[in-house]
Image: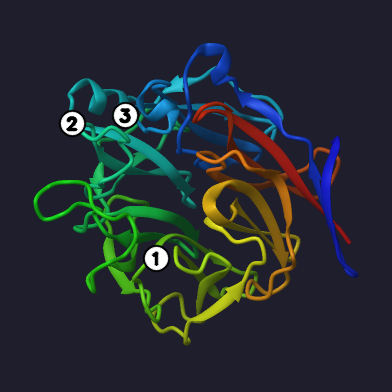
């Protein structure tokens, strides 16, 4: 891979490749807000979601459009032609919702479960307020999709989802961002009932039940979030604080969310919004928008609590850098992390980019 940047430590170095265009929205006259879900459903075979959004609404920073996906059978090197995610197309055609797919998981039986945010088409931005989230399953390798099922009775946004020991865990911030009179409200927590909850499924996404409330010290001013099981099975949950962007909330559970330790702040020197966390070769990798939402940053950690100084991958664009990541086999040996992110090319219109992170020890 062509080296773009790196983070060096005594015991490891994170090597970062130069980004390449995955979806050229500039060329096709569209935008690609949100919806970067990826999951591996067969060895080296992944589904990669992206949005096909209006370049006019909010100058491209809107979820007004539909969802597409591509399939790679060589661990993210090459991809099929785009296919429409029919549920999102039908929702838009019926004038019901715009749909975003920010997370997806694969179960042991091969079922792919895509988590869908439902947004009101009447608001220009179309990525808030939120209705109740749902899940859509495929049991035939993403050739066809079943009817959606409700994940949660609470309006809100699923910020992460993981599959662990036969159980799907979906991490939702329960805040509709809608005022009592129906107007658009605050997207960060501002009421006691705005809580992070985890919903689980033990039947490959056919049904979901509330598993727990994630007991952060406070959820006022919170939004976004990430969740991951580490190599020892410890569950880590994170939350963004709009009033303290350099200190991300972090809380852990050693029994899959049945009980939790006291939440802590973890310092991230360049700030973080839309945090996305993964683990590769024993190293935590955190990427997302930096402070004020106008940069793309990446950090590493050995424990998920203490992060390095991080690096700026790009600066001062704004209205972009929504991202996701997935660990895949490297054709040259070992593993590598595929990071998909949005990158502004004009106003708030974005292309979809791919870059790789490789850990050298």
Quarter of the picture containing the N terminus is: top right
Nearer the camera: disc 1 or disc 3:
1
Task: Say if mark 2 contacts mark 1, CB within 8 Å.
Answer: no
Which residue, given by chain and number where applicable, does mark 3 sit on?
A: 88
Q: Nearer the viewer, residue 101 or 166?
A: 101
Q: Name the residue located 68 percent from the left edge and 25 percent from the top edge.
A: 78
In the picture, measured across the screen, residue 89 lies left or right of residue 332, that is left
Residue 333: x, y in percent?
84, 45
Give percent across and percent down for residue 297. 66, 52
| Nearer to us in this view, 233 or 269 | 269
Tell me which residue sits at (50%, 69%) in the image.
244
Q: Name the residue located 31 percent from the left edge and 70 percent from the top edge.
A: 211
User: Residue 222: which disc?
Assistant: 1
Q: Residues within 10 Å of mark 3 (few under 14, many from 20)?
A: many
Expressed as whole percent of the image width and height from the top left, the position of residue 314 reads 69, 43
Disc 3 to disc 2: CB gap under 8 Å: no
Q: Is residue 291 visible?
A: yes
Answer whether labels 1 and 3 touch (C-beta < 8 Å).
Answer: no
The residue that mark 2 highlights is 96
N-terminal-most mark, 3 or 2 = 3
Label 3: which secondary element: helix
Q: Could you give the CA–CA distance between mark 3 and mark 2, rounded to whole angstroms?
A: 10 Å
Q: Spatial distance from mark 2 to mark 1, Cα to Cα?
A: 28 Å
Q: Residue at x 38, y 21 (%)?
A: 56
Give the SS element for disc 1. Answer: strand
Of the pair 90 and 306, the residue shown nearer to us? 306
Q: CA distance from mark 1 to mark 3?
A: 28 Å
């Amino acid at each position: 891979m062509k080296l773009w940047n790196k983070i060096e430590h005594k015991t490891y170095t994170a090597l970062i490749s130069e980004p390449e265009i995955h979806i050229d929205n500039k060329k096709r006259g569209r935008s690609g807000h949100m919806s970067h879900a990826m999951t591996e459903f067969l060895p080296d075979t992944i589904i990669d979601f992206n949005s096909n959004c209006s370049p006019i609404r909010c100058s491209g920073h809107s979820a007004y459009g539909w969802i597409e996906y591509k399939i790679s059978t060589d661990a993210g090197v090459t991809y099929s032609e785009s296919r429409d995610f029919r549920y999102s197309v039908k929702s838009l055609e019926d004038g019901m919702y715009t749909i975003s797919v920010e997370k997806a998981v694969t179960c042991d039986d091969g079922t792919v479960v895509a988590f869908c945010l439902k947004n009101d088409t009447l608001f220009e931005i179309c990525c808030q307020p939120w209705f109740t989230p749902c899940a859509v399953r495929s049991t035939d390798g993403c050739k066809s999709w079943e009817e959606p099922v409700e994940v949660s009775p609470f309006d809100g946004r699923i910020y992460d989802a993981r599959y662990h020991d036969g159980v799907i865990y979906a991490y939702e911030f329960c805040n509709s961002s809608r005022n009592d009179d129906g107007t658009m409200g605050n997207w960060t927590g501002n009421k006691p009932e705005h809580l992070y909850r985890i919903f689980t499924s033990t039947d490959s996404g056919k049904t979901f039940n509330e598993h727990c409330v994630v007991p952060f010290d406070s959820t006022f001013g919170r939004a976004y979030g990430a969740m991951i099981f580490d190599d020892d099975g410890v569950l880590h949950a994170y939350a963004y604080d709009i009033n303290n962007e350099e200190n991300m909330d972090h809380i852990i559970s050693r029994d899959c969310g049945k009980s939790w330790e006291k939440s802590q702040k973890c310092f991230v020197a360049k700030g973080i919004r839309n945090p996305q966390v993964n683990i590769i070769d024993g190293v935590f990798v955190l990427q997302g928008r930096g402070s004020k939402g106008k940069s793309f940053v990446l950090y590493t950690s050995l424990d998920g609590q203490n992060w390095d100084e991080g690096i700026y991958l790009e600066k001062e664009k704004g209205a972009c850098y929504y991202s996701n990541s997935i660990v895949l086999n490297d054709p040259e040996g070992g593993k590598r992390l595929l990071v998909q992110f949005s990158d502004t090319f004009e106003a708030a219109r974005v292309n979809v980019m791919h870059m790789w992170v490789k850990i050298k020890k």
